[in-house]
Image: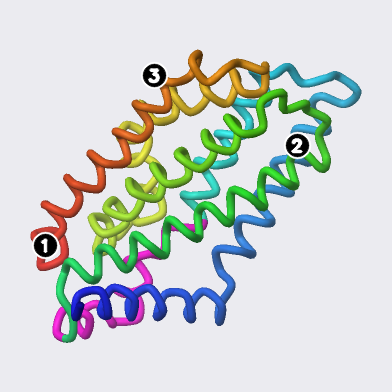
Amino acid sequence: MVVLQQIFAVFLKDLKSELRTRYALTAVFLFVLTTISIVLFATRDEQLTQGMAAGILWIIMFFSAMTGLSKSFVSEEERGTSFLLQLTTTSTAVYFGKLLFNCILNVLLNTVAILLFFFFIDVRVNSPLLFSLAILLGSLGIACSVTVISAIIAKANTKGALLPVLSFPLLLPLLISGIETTFLSLSGAKFSDVRGDFQMMGSYCVVVTTASYLLFDFIWQE
């Protein structure tokens, strides 16, 4: 019970910090608008295929996470509050509090990004339920990976450059399955066609979260 209270306290702290600065929301919103504008100028009157749309959506999701979730642990080091967290709460509470916040934030950011994408670009979604599930699992998987990588690079000098470099190899299996499921959902596939990819994406979230939890105490204390 105490651990749950500590997890919620860490989550609430990050939520209040984001609402006060609006760093992630503003940065991702501008990034999405810029990306969509470039796509519109590049394609002009051409119709995007389902494959191109799926690839662009996951590019937006990947770099949105690199922009919006990068401050998860970096901000603690910049403000000098990481030592206070180590004294007042457990590493388990810090990890799961940060993970919960990043998951919710990433789902919210990707939802806004996708709504903007479909508002400006005419792409038909033939299987809305499968599409929503693919985006949800993708958002959670990205948040799980970026959370622990943000903790690893928090004390490095080149934080901004390291995050995408370290994240891409770890996220590659998720990206491949995510792009495939998104493409199939846009094309109107059935659940049986994407069951294997969904199982892989769900397993990815579980494995990354478990491994991160087991290693986090060492990462956080070092």
Q: Which residues are magenta?
A: 68-87
Residue 38 got which mark? Answer: 2
Callout 1 environment at 10 Å: few (<14), some (14 to 19), or many (20+)?
A: some
Q: Amino acid at mark 3?
A: Gly
Q: Which residue is mark 1?
A: 217
Q: Position of residue 145 (x, y in %)?
A: 32, 46
Q: Residue at x 20, y 50 (%)?
A: 212
Work out whether mark 3 precedes mark 1 in sequence or the reverse, and give the earlier one.
3
Crowd around label 3: few <14 · some 14–19 · many ≥20 (10 Å): few
Who's the residue at 19% across and 47% down the image? 210
Which circle's residue, 2 or 3, is located before the other in the chain? 2
Q: In the rendered image of this protein, does residue 211 appear above or below residue 17?
A: above
Vertical side of 117 occupied by 124: above or below: above
Magenta stretch: helix, strand or loop mostly: helix
Name the residue type under label 2. Ile
- Per the model, the C-alpha gap separating discs 3 and 1 is 33 Å
* Quadrant showing the C terminus: bottom left
Q: SS of the residue at dot 2?
A: helix
Q: Is residue 86 magenta?
A: yes
Quick one: 84 or 111, which is closer to the camera? Answer: 111
The residue identified by callout 3 is: 196
Residue at coordinates 36% horizontally, 48% vertically from top-left?
163
CB within 8 Å, label 2 to label 3: no
* Residue beneath the point at 50% across and 60% down: 105
**Left or right of residue 142, residue 26 in this image:** right
Question: How far is the residue under mark 2 from the one under mark 3?
Answer: 34 Å
- Where does the image place residue 136, in percent across and percent down from the top left? 51, 43
Q: What is the spatial separation of the Cα atoms under label 1 and label 2, in whole angstroms? A: 42 Å
**Mark 1 residue type:** Asp
Direction from residue 173 to residue 209 in the image, left or right: left
The mark found on residue 194 in the picture is: none
Kindly indicate the quadrant of the structure image that contains residue 174: top left
